[in-house]
Amino acid sequence: MESELSNKPTRRRSKKRKLSKRRLKIKGRKRTTEKGISPLVEKYWRQRYNLFSSYDDGIKMDEEGWFSVTPEEIAIRHAERSGGGCVIDCFSGVGGNTIQFAKMCHHVVAIDLDPHKVELAFNNAKIYGVEDYIDFIIGDFFQLASSLKGDVAFLAPPWGGPSYKTIPNFSLDLLKPKDGYSIFQAAQAITPNIIMFLPRNVDLRQVEELSWLSSPPLNIEIEENYVQNHLKGITAYFGGTAFGKLNL
Ligand SMILES: C[S@@+](CC[C@H](N)C(=O)[O-])C[C@H]1O[C@@H](n2cnc3c(N)ncnc32)[C@H](O)[C@@H]1O
């Protein structure tokens, strides 16, 4: 009896401790810094000028946008290689690539499934003064592909969030919302001139296989993309975009 009594307060104390731990966890999830940035995106926020050099002029992002936008220097490189015609940006996100294509190309069609992303991309394109060169479409690329016309199809599909870095050999099957082969095949309905931006740890043997989906096989060139000496991704140039050959 005595021991039962002496146990009770201890149990209640540990229950209390568990409850307050849970409250702390919930508080942690909601925490934001004084700049209104959640701890999850703070690392990307510190690189904001690498993402958008005009960040301070009113660029708007959402959480997915922070970790999925193509760094500006790489987006400029993609635009330089696109030949200057009409580009279909099939997964346009918050507009990192779309903006650079619009600065250098005749016209851009920017597609995203998420209406909020399209709103953010429109805002961001206005900051760069290029919104008039872009048709923004809210829609599913896979449903739209067969009705699209363009000189170049640009593919920067989701890589499945920041955890992609932990995978030793990133398979094309891991791309979202469908595997890389299906994404590439859908783009081939538009044009054989395809630029694909992929994780730095992607299985290069599989990327080369994509060129064999066409008969005769497409030319392919692989490029590593660095920002301040950090390897950020791999770009595969197919068809006329390979080896800088596309002249429109
Ligand atoms: C990696 S982000 C693109 C980043 C973009 N290149 C940039 O620099 O801002 C991929 C985008 O694909 C969009 N997406 C996912 N599934 C899609 C689909 N079926 N059709 C069109 N867009 C889709 C997501 O909403 C996301 O914004």
Image (cartoon, rainbow, N blue to C red):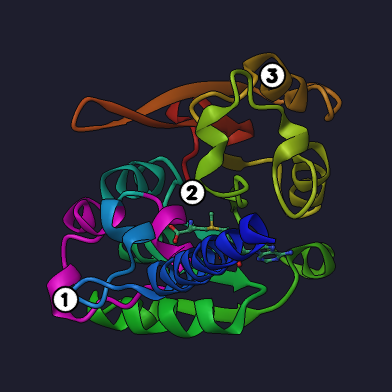
Disc 3 to disc 2: CB gap under 8 Å = no
Q: Is residue 139 left or right of residue 150?
A: right
Badge 2 element = loop
What residue is at 56 percent from the left and 49 percent from the top?
Answer: 161
The span picked out in magenta is: 44-70
Q: From the viewer's side, name the closer residue of 241 and 116.
A: 116
Q: Residue at x 16, y 60 (%)?
A: 53
Q: Nearest the camera: 190 or 50?
A: 50
State the SS at label 1: loop
Which numbered disc, 1 or 2, marks the residue closer to the eye? 1
Q: Which residue is mark 3?
A: 208
* x and y percentages locating residue 87 in the rendered image: 53, 59
Looking at numbered disc 3 in the image, what kind of residue is underneath it?
A: Glu
User: Within the displayed image, which quadrant is ligand 1 positioned in?
Assistant: bottom right
Percent of width and height locating residue 31 = 33, 72
Say the numbered circle drawn on residue 34: 1
Q: Which residue is farthest front? A: 2
Horizontally, residue 89 falls left or right of residue 21, namely right
Tell me the CA gap for discs 3 and 2.
Answer: 25 Å
Placement of 65 over or under 223, stated as above or below: below
Amino acid found under the numbered disc labelled 2: Leu
